[in-house]
Amino acid sequence: MTDCGLDTVLALIGAKWKMLILYHLCHARRRFGELRRLLPGISEKMLIQDLRQMRESNLLVRKDHRQVPPKVEYSITPFGRSLGKSLAPLCAWGDKNRKRVLGKKFPQKRSFERTDCDRLQRRNGAGQP
């Protein structure tokens, strides 16, 4: 155990895709297929597994609309939103250092803003169980 708390964060979102899932859910409620399209390279099995683990950790809520065709939406919880806010400095650092780390010039992506989760949660009503 470290004395900085990173072990706690990594226990929740240390897997390869979980931070990106959390990032996308901070912006809006998402259906499974939307998340799959937003995360090129993730397998269906891995997405299902990560969503299940994140739900068990109270980072997100799964809402099954019980209709045909099936409609399931995922949204962030207040607990997940608080963790999502902490990703803002990491996103900014990644944007600033993308070229240096990856060795190529990549287009600048929109940075994750501290208020993204709060603003979008109010607008979309996401995170409400």
Image (spheres, helix red, strand yellow):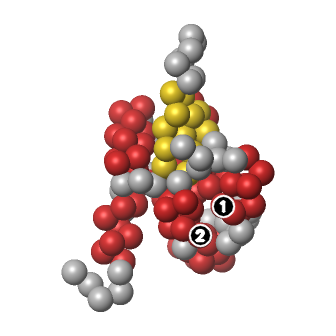
Callout 2: SS: helix
Task: Answer with left or right where residue 9 lies relative to residue 74.
Answer: left
Residue 54 coordinates in the image, percent (x, y)? 40, 50
Residue count near mark 1 (Cα–Cα under 10 Å), binned few <14, some 14–19, many ≥20:
many
Question: Of 89 and 5, which appears nearest the observer?
Answer: 5
Task: Tell me: residue 127, above or below residue 12.
Answer: above
Residue 55 coordinates in the image, percent (x, y)? 40, 46
Please tell me the numbered disc located at residue 117.
1
Outermost bottom residue: 3
Q: Looking at the image, which residue is at 66% across and 61% down?
A: 117
Outermost right residue: 123
Task: Answer with left or right where residue 61 lies relative to residue 120.
Answer: left
Q: Amino acid at mark 1?
A: Cys
Q: Looking at the image, which residue is at 48% across and 49% down?
A: 60
Task: Tell me: residue 86, above or below residue 71.
Answer: below
Q: Which residue is mark 2?
A: 85
Would you say residue 33 is visible in this rendering?
yes
